Image: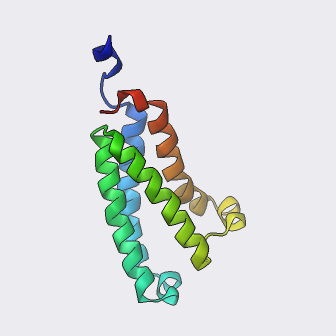
């Protein structure tokens, strides 16, 4: 019975991970944007490191690891807190701009999908 539950990675999670990898690529390009540069050099380094951490978490989710879920959840909470403290997290802008909404909603959507299939994780 236990082998039947772990039948592999769900297709929807695979698609979300691919979008996440693409988002990490876009995040590295974001480092040279005026909004990031206005925050200072430390924030550009933070964005780069957070992209690397997100790639590691997505690789873990791709391999269906429980630790990756918890690491990704921690990353999301810390990243949201830091962006809120810096002043770059504006929920009104996120709700009105479809591009911002899509980029912000991807991580919670990945976390929610992984939570649904949590029993399949190793």
Viewer-nearest residue: 44 or 18: 44
Residue 7 visible in the shown view:
yes
Residue found 45% across the figure and 81% down from its top: 43
How many tags in the picture? 0
User: In the displayed structure, would residue 101 be above or below residue 36?
Assistant: above
User: In the displayed structure, would residue 19 be above or below residue 112?
Assistant: below
- Give residue 77's position: percent from left, percent from top: 52, 58
Residue 88 visible in the shown view:
no
User: In the displayed structure, would residue 44 be above or below residue 69?
Assistant: below
Viewer-nearest residue: 97 or 92: 92
Residue found 59% across the figure and 75% down from its top: 85
Quarter residue 101 falls in: bottom right
Instruction: State left or right for residue 105 relative to residue 70.
Output: right
Viewer-nearest residue: 33 or 41: 41
Residue found 41% across the figure and 52% down from its top: 72
Instruction: State left or right for residue 30 relative to residue 103.
Output: left
């Amino acid at each position: 019975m236990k082998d039947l539950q772990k039948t592999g990675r769900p297709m929807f999670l695979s698609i979300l991970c691919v979008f996440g990898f693409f988002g990490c690529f876009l995040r590295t390009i974001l480092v040279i944007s005026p909004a990031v540069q206005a925050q200072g050099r430390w924030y550009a380094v933070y964005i780069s490191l957070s992209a690397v951490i997100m790639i590691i978490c997505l690789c873990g989710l791709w391999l269906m690891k429980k630790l990756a879920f918890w690491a990704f959840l921690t990353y999301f909470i810390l990243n949201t807190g830091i962006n809120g403290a810096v002043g770059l997290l504006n929920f009104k802008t996120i709700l009105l701009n479809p591009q911002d909404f899509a980029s912000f909603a991807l991580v919670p959507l990945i976390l929610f999908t992984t939570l649904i299939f949590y029993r399949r994780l190793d």
